[in-house]
Amino acid sequence: MTLPIIDTNYFTAFLVDLLNIPSPTGFAEPAIAFVEKELSKYKQLQLSRTRKGALVAKWDPSTRSGRKSDLPPVALTAHVDTLGAVVKEIKPNGRLKLSRIGGIQWNTVETEGVWVFASNGEKIRGSVLVDTASGHVYGAAGSETPRNDAHMEVRLDARTTSEKETRELGINIGDCVAFDPRVEVTNGFIRSRFLDDKACVANLVAAIKSMADSGQGPVRSVYFLISNYEEVGHGAAAGIPSDVAELVTVDMAVVGDGQESDEFHATLCIKDSGGPYHEGLNKKMRALAEQHNIPYKTDVYPFYGSDGEAFWRAGGDVALSLIGPGIDASHNYERAHMDGLNATTNWVMAYLLD
Ligand SMILES: [Zn+2]
């Protein structure tokens, strides 16, 4: 069996659009709604939402073929939520202190543009600065200031020099703050914040499109769970039906010193901070990659937990694997390459069609 062709232009356009939708954990609804709208084009899929707001797309092949597969259903999951922040305090000078979502490192967003989503519906532009930002005021001391919650602030692009004026802009404590993704596509590379895990959402959507366009479909029922609380650890803890036998988590692979993964391959993660994945399903994923000449690596991730493990911890009884494209500088200014991204889409299709 040869795999359907991937529409890479579609993949890239969809991914760029998704990257440009701000969706920090807790504020991911616009991204979920965007994926929902895209998947609603496929009449093969039944769409639903969990109470937590995640999107579930079920592809039941028996509704078309009339034949019921006796194989139990399987599931794949990827997450649209990202790192971000909320307004923690409004300072006497009108600037904002933030509380981070998902543990973004301050040094990775210093000078980054942000949108503050005020609870009255207004969007206010700003940027992240250390509170000793001016080189002509603080000199070398500015570089010695610790980059932490106490010293990092948002300077709003609005006329405010007091807490009162900032509150008059409509800003309240708890309002969402989203960091600019800075998406660029060059030479087969995609550079952006939050490729983790929007790249893999695009892998799932592109796989669905390729299978649907070629008139093919999964050999058994499959649930696609697009989760919305992964970055805080409990995304896929709910939303996978109990009759699902296997869960393939599709999330970024770790690239850096000492890692086997790179941007030109997909990776099967054998073990991460949550321990080893399921040996039997891992064997099956490796065999599929070999059979379809999918460029892949195996790896161990040092500071990493996945949505599949969230489901395991919540009591989910499934065989579990984790695959995904290599992402350089993860949770920082991330980068992926089409080779690793296509390898992941192909792996998803091989899993579903074989
Ligand atoms: Zn992720």
Image (tube, grey):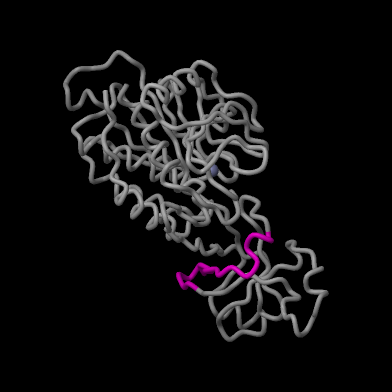
Place residue 55 in its image quadrant: top left
Question: For ligand 1, which image quadrant applies?
Answer: top right
Q: 99 and 18: which one is in front?
A: 18
Q: Which residues are magenta?
A: 106-123
Q: Residue furthest front?
A: 187
Asked if residue 56 lies left or right of residue 159, the reply is left
Residue 184 image offset from top left, x and y in percent: 45, 61
Residue 201 image offset from top left, x and y in percent: 41, 44
Place residue 112 in its image quadrant: bottom right
Q: 297 and 157: which one is in front?
A: 297
Asked if residue 74 lies left or right of residue 145, the reply is left
Magenta span includes 138: no
Q: Residue furthest top?
A: 70
Residue 313 image offset from top left, x and y in percent: 59, 28
Q: Residue at x 33, y 15 (%)?
A: 71
Magenta span includes 107: yes
Asked if residue 211 lies left or right of residue 77, the reply is left
